[in-house]
Amino acid sequence: MKIFINNRYYSKRNAKVSIFDHGYLYGDGIYETMRSNNGVVFKIDEHITRLFRSAKMIYLDIRYSKQEIKSAVYRTLKINKLKNAYIRISFSRGIGEIGLDTALCKKPVFVIITNKFRQYPKEYYKNGVKIIIAETRRNHPKSLNPKIKSNNFLNNILAKIEAKKRNAFESIMLNLDGFIAEGTVSNIFIVKNGILMTPSLKCGILGGITRKYILESAKKMKIKVKEAKIRINELYAVDECFITNTSIGIMPVRSIDGRRINVKGEVIKRLIKLKFN
Ligand code: PMP
């Protein structure tokens, strides 16, 4: 597998960044994950637009055009002979002396890692997964805005540790006001009385590309949708629930904090047929 670093390719073994990279020292950077099906990267333009938004929000000038990034992604897939792939692009602040001043770093480091796309086991989709509500709350938008898809991932990692301890697939974090926000790497949807609901962007979440695709598709399918503020007690009383992201697509949930949920609900049955290509 060849890894792209600042327009050059390296073997996995030799793909290295400096310990003085502020991405390493401070988690100062941003990223995107994408997937390709049959050589086509799903919603690549939306991912690159989100990348630019993240960059702007951390005052990072990434010095590549959208087209250059797109070409680099496709070139990396080609070099690695990948058609169905997982793709991760990241920009770190770059190499600089120790210190928080971003001006210490002269040039961002652009990395593209690709891999064969590995689907989660079929049983997960058939039987659903366990999720829990984490004690860890989602970062407040006025401290580190979840809209920034940042390399600074400790908030999510702490919640993920809770999921692992409780033998769950994913942790859902509440925001500081106690409303449902999002998973560590996913958005959450619920169905109640035939209405598909998901936390609104105002709840302080990442606007998932999959989330948007599902909302748009559901509207086209004449499913009633609502972006809302959702409380835990509503979550415990749902008819259906699923989580979404680029790699998992739509993953049905079979239990929330041990409370069982129907994984064969009417809305999930229709949405799970959506194609991610
Ligand atoms: N929320 C968080 C915190 C995430 O890391 C992700 C994964 N990128 C998502 C939601 C889902 O986003 P997407 O559908 O764009 O993969």
Image: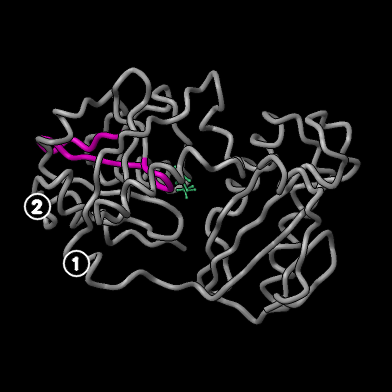
Q: Nearer the viewer, residue 118 or 161?
A: 161
| Above-or-below relation of 142 to 52 | above
At a point 69% along the width and 62% down the height, the residue shown is: 112
At a point 22% along the width and 38% down the height, the residue shown is: 196
Q: CA distance from mark 1 to mark 2?
A: 11 Å
| Mark 1 residue element | helix
- Mark drawn on residue 76: none
| Above-or-below relation of 3 to 31 | below
| Mark 2 residue element | loop
Q: Residues within 10 Å of mark 1 (few under 14, many from 20)?
A: some
Three-letter code for the amino acid on which mark 2 is drawn: Asn
Q: Is mark 1 within 8 Å of ligand 1?
A: no
Q: Is residue 107 left or right of residue 45?
A: right
Occupied quadrant, residue 93: top right
User: What's drawn in magenta, residue-wise?
Assistant: 183-198
Q: Position of residue 205 (x, y in %)?
A: 44, 32
Q: Position of residue 253 (x, y in %)?
A: 21, 52
Three-letter code for the amino acid on which mark 1 is drawn: Lys
Residue 187 magenta: yes
At a point 57% along the width and 76% down the height, the residue shown is: 83
Occupied quadrant, residue 30: top right
The residue identified by callout 1 is 126
Q: Position of residue 37 (x, y in %)?
A: 50, 70
Residue 16 magenta: no
The residue identified by callout 2 is 262
